[in-house]
Image: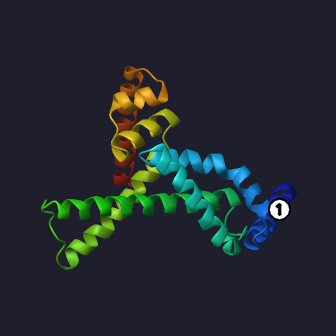
Amino acid sequence: MAASREQENADLALMRRVAANEEAAVAELYDRFGSLVYRMAYQAMPTRAEAEDAVQEVFVRLWRTAHRFDPKRAALVTWVMLISRRHLVDKLRRTRARVKASSLDEGTPIPAPTGAPAASAGLEHDERFGTLIERINALPELQRLVVTRAYLGGQTLRQIGEELNTPLGTVKSALSRALVRLRERSGEEQAI
């Protein structure tokens, strides 16, 4: 218990230094969590460049909100992960909105939402999407990478295999096992 109290105090001191614009503190925060945030971004974003941009944006957000960190509410790693996740989901939503807007420019009809039922359906869709992202993040690493890149990144299984230096058959198996797990977890929640 004393060790966790010491860690809480150290994390709080670090975030206070970050909030005070201390360059060494920002570097320390990046050293501790940069690779973790990058892994999340790399899994969620369609390209490496977008993942790198997202990491920079996450750390700017962490710097701007450092004064709000409270170790009694969440551990620093949890707080960093929550901010990262929110930022990545927001970024993916904005990307989808731009895709829809550009398809409108091309004359592709997209049904416009009308009335309250559509608005509540949109909120329900956002909740389901958030739940799905949480389930995907709980998958083993290879399965998570394959699902994220195939369904959120729009990559083919062959592209994923080449990028991960993994045989195509292994990628296909990972996708199949991941989809089975996601369906099982979906069924478990419906039974509750």
Q: Is 85 displayed left or right of 30 in the figure?
A: left
Q: Is 58 displayed left or right of 21 in the figure?
A: left
Is disc 1 surrounded by few (<14), some (14 to 19) or many (20+) residues within 10 Å?
Answer: some
Tell me if I can see residue 186 in this picture.
yes
Q: Position of residue 176 (x, y in %)?
A: 35, 31
Q: Is residue 180 above or below residue 74?
A: above
Name the one closer to the observer, 138 or 158.
158
Q: Secondary structure at mark 1?
A: helix
Q: Is residue 103 above or below residue 175?
A: below
Q: Which residue is mark 1?
A: 10
Q: Position of residue 153 (x, y in %)?
A: 37, 45
Name the one closer to the observer, 80 or 97.
97
Q: Is 25 displayed left or right of 134 in the figure?
A: right
Q: Position of residue 140 (x, y in %)?
A: 51, 36
Q: Is residue 169 above or below residue 89?
A: above
Residue at image x 75%, y 56%?
A: 27
Q: Position of residue 122 (x, y in %)?
A: 28, 68
Asked which colour scheme the image uses, the reply is rainbow
Tell me if I can see residue 174 in this picture.
no
Q: Looking at the rendering, in which quadrant would you find the C terminus?
A: bottom left
Residue at image x 72%, y 69%?
A: 72
In this rendering, the count of numbered labels is: 1
Q: Is residue 47 above or below residue 98?
A: above
Residue at image x 62%, y 61%?
A: 59
- Tell which residue pokes out farthest to the bottom in this image: 115
Amino acid at circle 1: Ala
Q: Looking at the rendering, in which quadrant would you find the N terminus?
A: bottom right
Name the one closer to the observer, 25 or 12.
25
Residue 109 location, quadrant: bottom left
Residue 148 location, quadrant: top left
Name the one closer to the observer, 6 or 190.
6
